[in-house]
Amino acid sequence: MNATEHTSWIAFSKSKCIASGAPREVATDVKRIADSQASDNVLVFDAKTSQRIEIDLRGSLSAVLRRLPAAQQQEPAPDSALPTSSGRTAGRPRLGVIAREVTLLPRHWEWLATQPGGASVALRKLVEQGLRSSKEADRLRQAQEAAYRFMEVMAGDSPGFEEATRALFAGDLGRLQQLVSKWPRDVRNHVLTLAAVTVPNSP
């Protein structure tokens, strides 16, 4: 069983994938399996980032589902970061602008003061340019970190782990496939699914 691009969570019991999909579906499967097999050796991950997900399996299924972290079940609404305690505020609240302290050298402030629109507009433009220019590098780095995070938990003691890690960060998928070929099937398949995202311009 493999995660797809639409998967939110993926769960493993030892080295076997027991569920993947939307959070409520995974939690339901994990609860059912835990109740039937009395197994506490279940690990749940965010299928994209490989962050560990803790599910409180006590009580009934409905109780388990009620306790699921709401933030991990759905994407935040577009305006979720906007102030809600009052009506309109000064400026452009619909943009979700957040005020925070920025420390710069005097020459930086002097330069910003000469830019059209002032310091805030100039800083936003610089950040947007940085986001665009580093988008692909950031995506690759985050994908590598996700793959490594999963590998470390599920295969840290497996043969060839160190070499597989080096192949992952080198972007050598052919070498990685060779090194993980003897790992448990479901673990191997998910590692390779995560690693495939680390290739530039991959789907």
Image (spheres, rainbow, N blue to C red):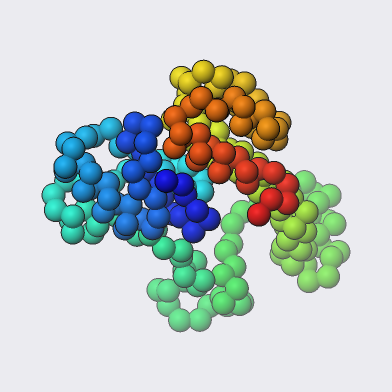
Specify whether residue 75 is in view.
Answer: yes
- In front of the other: 15 or 41: 15
Residue at 83%, 56% (x, y): give it. Answer: 110
- In front of the other: 75 or 3: 3
In the rendered view, tell whether residue 173 sits above or below residue 106: above
In the rendered view, tell whether residue 181 sits above or below residue 126: above
Is 45 on the left or on the right of 68, as rendered?
Answer: right
Specify whether residue 153 is in view.
Answer: no
What is the quadrant of residue 111 in the picture? bottom right
What is the quadrant of residue 167 in the picture? top right
Is 156 on the left or on the right of 13, as rendered?
Answer: right
In the rendered view, tell whether residue 98 sits above or below residue 144: below
Residue at 21%, 53% (x, y): give it. Answer: 64
- Residue 201 percent location from the top left of the image: 73, 51
Residue at 49%, 59% (x, y): give it. Answer: 6
Q: Quadrant of the C terminus?
A: bottom right
Residue at 41%, 63% (x, y): give it. Answer: 74
| Labels in figure, total | 0
In the rendered view, tell whether residue 105 sits above or below residue 115: above
Is 108 on the left or on the right of 153, as rendered?
Answer: right
What is the quadrant of residue 62 in the picture? bottom left
- Residue 190 percent location from the top left of the image: 50, 40
- Residue 46 percent location from the top left of the image: 44, 47
- Extreme residue toward the left, this view: 59
- Residue 15 percent location from the top left of the image: 38, 32
- In front of the other: 54 or 89: 54
